[in-house]
Image: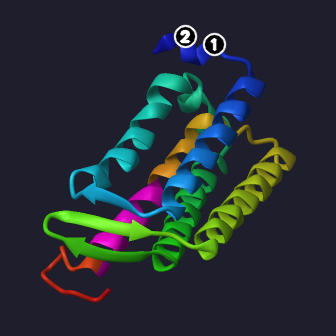
Amino acid sequence: MSHLANLPTYAYAILGVLLIAVVIARQIGERRMSLGKLVVMPILFAILPFFIDKGIGHELVASPLAIPLLLAGIVVGAVAGLARGMTMSVRLEGSMLVTKGSWKTVLSWLGLIVVRIAMAGGAALLGIHEGTGTIFFCVAATFAAQNLLLAYRAGVLGGLKTA
C-alpha cells in the first residue's frame, strides 16, 4: 500500500470525490448489512492514515493547535454521523440491518464536507497542515457514530427498539 503514499494531491482529491459519491449513492438506496459490516468502514478509515499519510506524526507535533484541531475534526465527524443516522430509515430483518437514506442524508454529507473544508481552510490560515490522515480520522468518526446510532435505532444495542 506504500505506492498510495506517492500519489499527487490532486489524485487524492479525485479519489476522495469518487469515494464520497459512491458512499452517498449507497446510503440513499436501500441496503442490507450484517452487524459485522457496521464496523468495517470506521475501522478501515481509522487504520488508513497510518499507511497513507506518512507525515501525520510530524503534522500533529508541528503546532500546538494540531491535536486540538484533529480532535475537533473527530467531534465534527461524530456529530455529523449522528445527524446523518437520524436521516435514514432503519429496520432489523433477522440478523440484517436494512437502511435507506433520503435527500436529508445527502444534505448531511454536504454539510460535513463544507464544515471540513472550512476547518482545513482555517487550519491553513493558522499555518497548520492537515493531511489526508486527519480527514480520514474524521470520516472514521462519522461512520462510527452513524452506524452506532443505526444499530441502536434498530434495537440491536441493549435490546431497545427505537426505530
Residue positioned 41% across, 66% down in the render:
145
Task: Residue 103: give x, y in percent of width and height.
Answer: 64, 73
The verdict on residue 152 being magenta is yes
Q: Residues within 10 Å of mark 2 (few under 14, many from 20)?
A: few
Amino acid beneath label 2: His
What is the quadrant of residue 44 in the picture? top left
The magenta stretch spans which residues? 141-153
Magenta stretch, overall SS: helix
Q: Is residue 143 magenta?
A: yes
Q: Which residue is mark 1?
A: 6
Image quarter of residue 11: top right
Question: Would you say 35 lies left or right of 22 here?
Answer: left
> Is 109 placed above or below 137 here?
below
Q: Position of residue 24 (x, y in %)?
A: 58, 56
Whether residue 138 is visible: no
Residue 106, given in percent of the width and then of the height, sits at 64, 66
- Is residue 141 or residue 152 the one in the foreground? 152
Residue plotted at (53% across, 30% down): 57
Residue identified by numbered label 2: 3
Q: How is the image coloured?
A: rainbow
Q: Quadrant of the C terminus?
A: bottom left
Quarter of the image holding residue 159?
bottom left
| Residue visible at 49% across and 62% down in the picture | 29
Q: Nearer the viewer, residue 7 or 93?
A: 93
Question: Is label 1 in contact with label 2 (beta carbons under 8 Å)?
Answer: yes
The answer to which of 10 and 65 lies nearer the viewer is: 10
Q: Secondary structure at mark 2?
A: helix
Q: Nearer the viewer, residue 32 or 71?
A: 32
Query: Mark 1 packing: few (<14 Cα in 10 Å), some, or many (20+)?
Result: few
User: Residue drawn at (32%, 45%), measured in percent from left and top?
Assistant: 40
